[in-house]
Image (cartoon, rainbow, N blue to C red):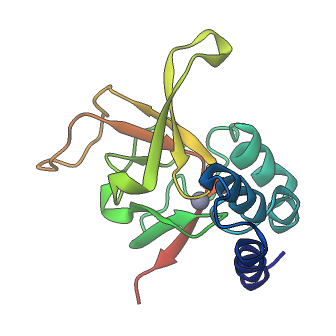
Amino acid sequence: MTYGNALNFIMMVKVILPKKTNPTILYIMKLEAFPNSNGMNEQEIKQKLTEEEYKVLREKGTEAPFTGKYVNTKDKGMYVCKVCGTELFSSTAKFDSGTGWPSFTEPANLEHVELVEDNSHGMHRTEVKCKKCGSHLGHVFDDLPTGRQAGQDSLGKRYCINSVCLDLKNEA
Ligand SMILES: [Zn+2]
């Protein structure tokens, strides 16, 4: 179902349903028409991504360290969500953590990410997700990174993000 179709569908349902229909029912119908907030259902997302990308983004996998294409990238620009294009991390917040994954001191906009407690694999970590589409991005740690650029204002956060979850939009 395309975005336009879904909207038409909701409008149509609203006309058909009695005026007193419980708002919750309308909300559930809306959720079904928009399986995620980007208007793509899981099957469409799966088709858009490679097998590895899907495994990391939608099944909380982790790419092998030092293999991601953005580990050592110093290019300027905005890293956006591979699934929905939401602006996630600016290159200005990127630093060389030596961990083998792209690392950032902060998101481009805190409103664009969701932090979730993650106790899987016998570890206590904080998962970082794209707020818009719910895709897994990586984890955030409170340890101060080594090799951080001098003078950079940081709260000591290290956003450890999988390359496959990101697309770098270079500055024009
Ligand atoms: Zn997203």
In the image, residue 151 lies at what x, y percent?
A: 11, 49
* In the image, residue 79 above or below residue 156: below
In the image, residue 82 lies at what x, y percent?
A: 64, 64
Q: Is 69 or 26 nearer to us in this picture?
A: 26
Residue appearing at x 76%, y 53% in the figure: 53
Q: Can residue 100 be seen in the rendering of this structure? A: no
* In the image, residue 162 above or below residue 166: above
Q: On the image, which quarter does residue 43 sit in?
A: bottom right
In the image, residue 26 lies at what x, y percent?
A: 68, 59
Determine whether, in the image, residue 132 is placed left or right of residue 152.
Answer: right
How many circles with numbers are drawn on the protein? 0
Determine whether, in the image, residue 8 is placed left or right of residue 96.
Answer: right
Q: Residue furthest bottom?
A: 172
Q: Can residue 58 be seen in the rendering of this structure? A: yes
Residue appearing at x 68%, y 58% in the figure: 21
In the image, residue 144 lies at what x, y percent?
A: 28, 30
Give the quadrant of the N terminus: bottom right
Give the quadrant of the C terminus: bottom left
Residue appearing at x 43%, y 56% in the figure: 112
Q: On the image, which quarter does residue 75 sit in?
A: bottom left
Residue appearing at x 60%, y 47% in the figure: 162
Q: Is 31 or 109 nearer to us in this picture?
A: 31
Quarter of image, ligand 1: bottom right
Q: Residue furthest top?
A: 122
Determine whether, in the image, residue 167 is placed left or right of residue 155.
Answer: right
Q: Is 119 or 26 nearer to us in this picture?
A: 26
